Amino acid sequence: MTLAAVAFGLMPLSSVEAEDHPAPIEALEEEGLEVHGEFDAPGGLSGFAASHRGQPMTIFVTEDGEHAIVGNLIDADANNLSEAPLERLVRGPQDETTWQSLEDSAWIADGDPDAERIVYVFTDPNCPYCTRLWQQSRPFVESGQVQLRHVMVGILDPESPRQAVTMLAADDPQAALRAHESGDPIEPMRQLPRDLEQRLQSNHELFRSFGMVATPGIVYRNDGKLEMSQGLPSEELFHTIMGPEPN
């Protein structure tokens, strides 16, 4: 599942000022349209890359500036002329914003920071499927091919928040996570650092902003585009996320 439709409504991009737009675009903006950029279009049309209620779309304004067509523009060879502008002006920048929000979250590194693939995993200390994913990913992580970044959450058990913060606060968070997932459950701290409690709450808000309801929640790049999955992935999806088997 692509993240674009989810993230548009939650982390909007800067739009062009409404007074610079033709009347049909302004009318649509009053109904909630967000314009992300303008692009050249054939046939005397002016193209606008936009989104409405989380859905990306292109709008083409006629040469007189009085009428607009909402939808994709197709050429004589059935090529979709809307796809490239949407990728460049809407999806690409939004993916970068989304990826940055993950980088800024409270996560535990698992693997080589110079790994070719970076995968974010929303992880609950009491999620058995998170443990299975951790186990299945060992060859990919230990080979240096993949770094997992476990964005810690505490949603499945009353002790989960305390355990998650305890892992984040450990002298060696990766070792704490490894021990916990290997069957040595972490003993929660009695006094939790307030700043990490707040960061855990921010992780929860980020988790919900993606529309996720289950762990592990996985965010990854597939052919340069951000996608996500929830729960333990199928074998086929697992290899899409992790890449080919390590040598």
Image (cartoon, rainbow, N blue to C red):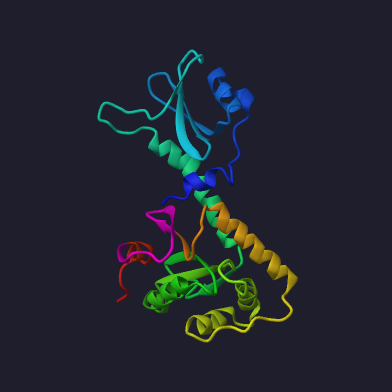
Position above or below: 124 against 174 = above
Left or right? Give the position of 167 relative to 80: right
| Residue 196 on image: x %, y % | 69, 70
Position above or below: 101 against 180 = above
Left or right? Give the position of 92 relative to 244: right
Report the residue at 51% width, 56% height from top. 212
Q: Foreground: 238 or 156? A: 156
| Residue 143 on image: x %, y % | 38, 78
Quadrant of residue 198 within the rendered picture:
bottom right
Quadrant of residue 185 within the rendered picture:
bottom right
Report the residue at 55% width, 74% height from top. 125
Q: Is residue 227 magenta?
A: yes
Which residue sits furthest front?
A: 158
Q: Which residues are magenta?
A: 220-236
| Residue 112 on image: x %, y % | 47, 75
Position above or below: 1 against 84 = below
Which residue sits furthest bottom?
A: 184
